Amino acid sequence: MKNSEADGRRWLSQAENDLGAAQHMADGGFYAQACFMCHQVAEKALKALAYYRGDRYVLGHSLLQLLREIVGTFPEMSQFESLMGVLNQYYVPTRYPDALPGGTPFETYNQRQAEEAVGGASRLVDAARGLIPA
């Protein structure tokens, strides 16, 4: 039998650790990678909430879909809908050189995007942490 609360805490802990990695990437000038990692942070934080509330299997990578699935239980998370739309855009094109027309991810993404992604992911993790006590 799954321990929902423990699973939620584990997923959130990994999201927090990934957030630290995203910050290091952004600080080091790896903007595309930082943006992608922020997608991963958000995905894990949203899945943490789903597991915490008792979901047995949480599949998918669409942040908007994951958010919509948990907002009935955690209505305060609806404030992140716009952010999830932005971070969703960082799932594929930040990683593959053929995902963007005429450029590579490392040449395309910039410091502002990385800083905004890290800031948004940080706010999301803080909100999830407020719903999942340590």
Image (cartoon, rainbow, N blue to C red):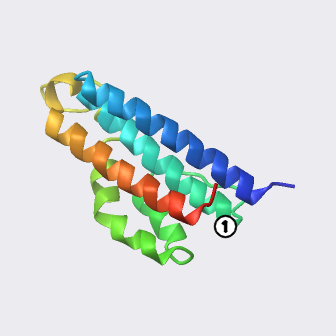
For residue 61, say whether it is visible. Answer: no
- Quarter of the image for residue 54 reads bottom right
Q: Is residue 15 above or below residue 103?
A: below
Question: Mark 1 — residue?
Answer: 53
Q: Is residue 128 left or right of residue 53?
A: left
The single residue placed furthest to the left in the displayed view is 102
Q: Is residue 93 left or right of residue 91?
A: left
- Quarter of the image for residue 97 reads top left
Can you say which quadrant of the picture contains the N terminus?
Answer: bottom right
Q: Residue at 18% of width from left, 33% of height from top?
A: 109
Report how many numbered discs are placed on residues in the image: 1
Q: Residue at 30% of width from left, 37% of height from top?
A: 35
Q: Residue at 73% of width from left, 52% of height from top?
A: 6
Expressed as whole percent of the image width and height from the top left, the position of residue 91 reads 36, 41
Q: Residue at 20% of width from left, 32% of height from top?
A: 100
Q: Is residue 101 above or below residue 112?
A: above
Expressed as whole percent of the image width and height from the top left, the position of residue 99 reads 26, 32
What type is the residue that disc 1 sits on?
Arg
Q: Is residue 125 left or right of residue 54?
A: left
Expressed as whole percent of the image width and height from the top left, the position of residue 26 reads 27, 30
Q: Is residue 22 above or below residue 87?
A: above
For residue 32, say whether it is visible. Answer: yes
Element class at badge 1: helix
